[in-house]
Structures are given as structure tokens and as C-alpha cells.
Amino acid sequence: MRARTLSAVAGGVVVSTVLACPVPGESPGGDPNRPVAHFAPAEHWVNDPNGPVWYEGRYHLFFQHNPAGDVWGSISWGHAVSDDLVHWEELPVAIPATDDELVFSGTVVVDHGNTSGLGADGRDPLVAVYTSYDPTTHVQAQSLASSTDGGTTWTRYPGNPVLDIGSREFRDPKVLWYADGGYWVMLVVLATEHVVQLYRSDDLRSWTHLSDFGPAHAVGGVWEMPDLVELPVDGDPDRTRWVLVVSLNPGSPTGGSGTQYFVGDFDGTTFTPDDLRDDDVPEGDVVAAFDGPTYGDGWETTGGAFGSGPVPGTLPGQNHVSGFVGERVVNSFLGGDRSVGTLTSPPFRITRSHLALLVGGGDAPHEPGTGDGGAPPGTVLGDFEGDRFAGWTATGTAFGDGPTRGDAPCQDGVTGYLGTGLASSYRNGTSGDPCVPVPDTGTGTLTSPPFTITADHVSFLVGGGPHPDTAVRLLVDGQVVRSTSGPQSGTLDWASWDVSDLRGREARVEIVDASTDGWGHVLADHVVLGDEPALPRGAATSVDLLVDGQVVRSATGTGSEVLDRVSWDVRDLVGRDARLRVVDSATGPWGHVLLDHVVATDAAVPRRLERYDWMDHGSDFYAPLTFAEHPDGEAVAIAWMSSWTYAASTPTTGWRGAMTLPRRLSLRTVDGRVRLVQVPAPDSSALASEPRWTVRDVPLDDAVVPLPRAVGDALLLTAELDVGTADEVGLHVRSKDGQRTVVGYDARTGRVLVDRRASGVVDLHPAFPAVHSAPVEVADARVRLTVVVDRSSVEVFAQDGLVTITDLVFPDADAQGVAAYAEGGRAVLRSLEVRRLG
């Protein structure tokens, strides 16, 4: 997003002031991140909501809770109650963990008629159906607890567990009363198999399997927290559909946690979706299909990650790979995440407006200023590929008789070299099996033949110890004029010397090991004399498009073995020659990349994940559950407002985690498809103050327009914007100089967005500073936004709740400004109502 100069509000503005803007007060508990209108525990950790239920005039919320700390652990059920879904009273822990059982997620039902027999004194019980986790065996089974005093105290059922299949990935029961059949139905997931199982019971104690649903749609992570609810379509109570909700971690469109839904029919036994989306191969010119056992003519590889050709899917030690077309896929997991290398296509001409490709694997992007690990052009002085050192002279015992093929005996983790060999002075073990470590006493040198310096740079790969006497050196007239040691790592990386001042001089390269201390060895490979220095290797798992040798487009996976569509707009490159380069220069977890089926197309191809239905398109909406027994008969859901990607790192004090605002769910027909719609459920009088400030008809002429009366860290904003000729239009919230969270609409792509890259504290995880967006239908170029800004979160409901985006933000406490903006043309802020939360 381009930076804009702040300008004053122009003429034609109609302003109505109802209440003066109050001075923001102290945040509860002294933490400026603690929310005003969202439930968060007084202290310690919270994650999934559990058993939300309306009972005897109050909303009850149970939740995954660590009563003893602000990270996950000792998982118990916390408990809070509310009269209005905004103001919550936290009660003592409802179901505590024991030495033998952690209390995982589940449901609370009102057992009308006491079908379970767990009531007392003629009173129907509340029954919690939860996953009991055995910390010794790691088995997950379904158990019961009951309460006859309104949820204050709970008694575990002595016959627990009531459903046990011996699985370690069997959890999160959602129980509902199926009125047409007169029995209870439980949904519970086989998490790693991506299956929702349905069971039936007459008494909540004995369960019979009914059917299975799944795998379907997004399967890039474990399935969790199922829910099933019947809703009217377009407000017609005689036309209903069932909505099955399943949370996924990771593998959402943002890469981390997310929640998908399916619209369909439930007959008391089986859920049948209306529309399962297949991934159609896009029409166009196939650039690369990767169907054969080799990459084909003109493709080039470096390193060992890509082998000699595509592979039939999953490699040894890898989780299941899916989402590719045909029988084979490019997969750099060859040899595990330690392997690195590149795969480069022959040149091809860009003739269409877009390139579509299937990409998976790690999410480490190309880093500007880094290379792909390949050697720079020039004269190779030593590549250490033969059986001997090929003209290099060895002294001492450190380097042996010739190059080392990867790890030396008793060594583990040497990566980053090119080809099959390297110069290694590691002599710390025998070649037996098992190896027998010995002291690192080997010392010696390995020296190149003399050469004349005819270029400006000497580049080489170096690893090993950081000592001055475990180094690669440049000798001129027998004197050391340059020296570089390793980074105390078994991963070699590029180093370069500028030798332009030594042109014409005769020199030698010497690799020396004169150390017997820890890390007393040196690793070296591929010494090159050339006009350009080598670039340090980035830790990338990317697919790059190169034009004139420069990276002009780049894509990565999302930390998933499921490949998804990426579409590059290359209209500005039509008629140019390009290459594809697949780069694996990462050696940590998810240090691999997957690629398949590159197609030149005439239009953008949506990501596979975006063809599915998602409850929310931000990073911080997970594990929603609907309230049982809602007094209005409506479906109201509440979710955990965080992501497993960084939940343990959020910068809060004494507490960690919060819930979203409860949301009222409904179904709307849009372009012939039934879609889920969500709006804030709390009554507006409970959620926010009376309107305090309204503004109308603010022209936005390619600028950011401050709204100085709209100030606060906890606001309810309702806006309507006329897109006009602008490329992008929207609001800045929680803003001050250098900070802002952007809520906008990109007219070029037809997407509503939240940009939190400059929202304050964004370095808690590499995935945190990001733009999250979703396609949305906009009629008459009018964008309607309801934005709930709390102290550490932003929830966006676009086009009357058709699309939602929920993101945590951690701005400075004094970042309380609001502004409207337009980019690339003229737009109008038709109306904005600002109300204070709480």
C-alpha cells in the first residue's frame, strides 16, 4: 500500500456530533491490550470455547483454560456467565484437570427429561460431553460430567469414558438433540484423518456409530471442533439447510488456523453437502506438467534436493502429499528437510496475462539480496567432486585423501554444499557402525594451485568452526591477505572477497584447520573467481519467476503438504523471456517446496482454498461453537480469537487469549449459492454507547483524510463508501504516526482486506505482519463495513456480514486515530457512525 500525505477534510462534509469524544481511561488490569467487549480470562491461558449454552436466563461460556499459567498446559474447563454477551463474570474453574486426565474441548447440553439419569431431585441436569486426554497413553476418549446446580459444580460420570476407540486423535464432541428422531447426535473428529464421525445415543451414555463425513475440501492440517446447525435460507423458516463447521490447523487461506463450513442436508444419520468443489485444471498453455520420470530437456538442477525428476507424491519420512495433478510432483523433500538445491526451467516466452501454478511445502519466501544457493559465473578453482583433490595439495591429517561425501563418520547435518563432495577437515570418528567418536585432533591444510587474479571477486562456500585457524584464506606472496571462517554450523553458505585491488597478482586459496578445540574443523566447497560476488543463500522454499536473471514474482507454500493454486499477474511481462526457478535453501522444519502443473492463462485462477467456504478470512478466528438453547431459537457462535501459529507469543501481561464477539448466523442466497452470513450478536445498546459522532459525504481524493473527532482504542464503526474511480478505499484505525491498521476494499481485485503490517508490535512471529483479504460482491460500487475495534483486535463484517475478517493487533496505547483513505482515484465516504464500545 502506497504511503499517502495526510490532508484536511475538504468541503461538503456534513458532521453530526452527539457526544463529545471521551478521554480513554485506564485499561482493565493495567494491560493496554486487555479487551473491552470481548471475553478474556482475568489471568492465564485460554483457547477453544467449550459448551456455550443458555440456561436459566444467562449465557454460560466454558473454555479451554490453564489455571496455573499463560501458556497451554494443565488444560481444564474455565467458566464465565453473561446476561448480554458483552459483560462477562468469570466463575471458578468448572472441570479441573487431574493427574490422570486433561479436559479437552466439548459440549454442554440441557438434558431435558433427564435422559442420562444424571439429574437429581427432579431437576434436569446440565451434561458436559468432553474429550478426556490420558497424559500417559495419550489416548483421547469422550467422557461426561454433570451439574445440577446451574453449572457451578460438576461431577464426573463414574462410567467414563462413554466413547473410546483407542485413538490418540479422536476429540472435540459436539452434541445436539435431533428432534425429528428424538435422540442425541454427537459429532467428533478423527483429527488427522480429516473425518467427522456421527454417533447416536438415547441417554448420552451409550453411543452407536451412524456415519462419517470427510475428507473434504481443506485438509492441510488436523480437523478439530465440529459443529452442526440448522438455519433458514433467506429468512424462510420453511426452507432450511444444515451447516457443518470444521476447524483446521494449519492449512487455512492465511496459512495457519481457520474454520471452513459446508452447507447441506442432515437426515438424522448422514450429512450430505450440497456442493463439494473439485479442483478443475485451468484452461491455457501448459508450461510444465511434471508428468514424466525426468524434468525434461533444458531443466537444470543444483544441489541434492530435487534429484533427477518429479516423484510419485510422498517421499520417505514425509507427511502425505496431495493436491497435485497426475501421478508426479516436484518435491524437494528428497533426503529430508536437510537437502537444498535449485531446479531451473529452460527459457520460455510469456504470452498470456497470468501464470497459474500449484505450490506447497514451506512458507519461507524469497529474500531480496539473497541468492538461491547456486554458484556465481566465473572460473571454478575447486569443486571437490572427484575422488581426489584435483591439483590441490593437502598437508597433515585433517583433510584425508580426497573430498568428503556429505557427513563424515560420526558427523550429522552437513548441508549447503554443491554436487556430491566437499572439502572437510572433520575427523572426529571411525567409519564403523555404530561410529566411535574420537577427539578432534586432526590438523592440516588444503592449498589450491597458483592462479592469476583476473576478476574482482573470489567466492566460496564455507561452514564449520568460527575460529581464525579453521578458515578459508587467500595467500599472495605467501602472506594471508583475506580470511573467512565458518558460522559454527554444518550448513555451508556463500562468502565472497573483493580482490579488485589484487588484479594481476598470483595467488593461492588455502583451507586451513589448525584447531583441536570444539568446532575445530572447516568445511569448504566450490571456489569461484568471477566478476560478481556470490549472494548469501536465503532460507527460502520458493518458486520464483526470473526475467533477465532477476526475481520478478515469487510464491511459497503455506506450511502444508497440500498444494494450492497461485496465480501471478504477468501482463506487464508479456513478450518477455522468463525462467522458473524452484528454490530450496532452507534446512529447518518445512524446509522443502512442492510444485506442479504450471499453466499460462488469460485470467487469474483462484486459490483452491478460496474455492471453499470459510467462516472468517483473518488469522484469528478458530474453533467456533454455537450456543445451545438460545432463547430466540437463533444460532449464535463464539470462537477463540487467536491462531496456533503464534498464540503463545502474544504480548499480553498475565493473561493470554480472548474470544471473538458472539455472532448471529444466517444463510443468504448469493448468485445461486447459499452462503453463511455473520453479524455481531450482542444487542447494540450493550455493545456500544449511543452514537457519539457521525460524518457524511467526505471526498477522498487519492489521500488519507484524518477524522479527528473519531478517536479511541475500542470503537464500533459503521461505514459506507462509494468506490468511485479509486483503486482502493477504506479506513485506518488504531493509527498514529507510523502505525495503522488498514481496513479497505481493493477495487482492482474485488477483495476486502485487513493490513496489519504496521499495526504496532508485529515481530512476535514471521507470519504476523500480513495482509488478509477475501473476495466480496460489491453492488453499485458501494462498500459497507462494520468494524469492531477493540484494544487488541479488529473484526470486520463486510457487505452486511457476507465476509468477515478477524485479526489481532497490538498497537501502542496512544494509537487511537481513525482516518478514511482512497488510493489511485477519487472515492467518497458516504457515511460513518462511530460509537464507543462498552
Image (cartoon, rainbow, N blue to C red):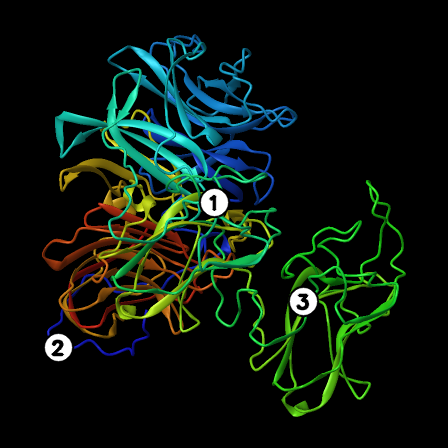
* Circle 1 SS class: loop
Residue at which label 3 appears = 383
In the picture, measured across the screen, residue 814 lies left or right of residue 817, that is right
**Along the polypeptide, which appears first: circle 3 or circle 2?**
2
Q: Which mark is residue 469?
A: none
| Residue 187 percent location from the top left of the image | 39, 23
> How far apart, in angstroms, are the residues tagged by discs 1 and 3?
28 Å
> How far apart, in angstroms, are the residues tagged by discs 3 and 2?
71 Å
* Res. 830 image quadrant: bottom left
Say which residue appears at 18% left-offset and 68% top-offset: 726
Q: Residue 11 carries which label?
A: 2
In this rendered view, identify the residue nearer to me: 158 or 207. Answer: 207
**Along the polypeptide, which appears first: circle 1 or circle 3?**
1
Residue at which label 1 appears = 293
Residue 95 visible to an observer of this rendering: no
| Residue 684 percent location from the top left of the image | 24, 46
Q: Type of residue at label 1?
A: Pro
Dot 1: within a 10 Å radius of its alpha carbon, few (fewer than 14), some, or many (20 or more) residues?
Answer: some
Q: Type of residue at label 2?
A: Gly
* Res. 181 image quadrant: top left
Q: Type of residue at label 3?
A: Asp
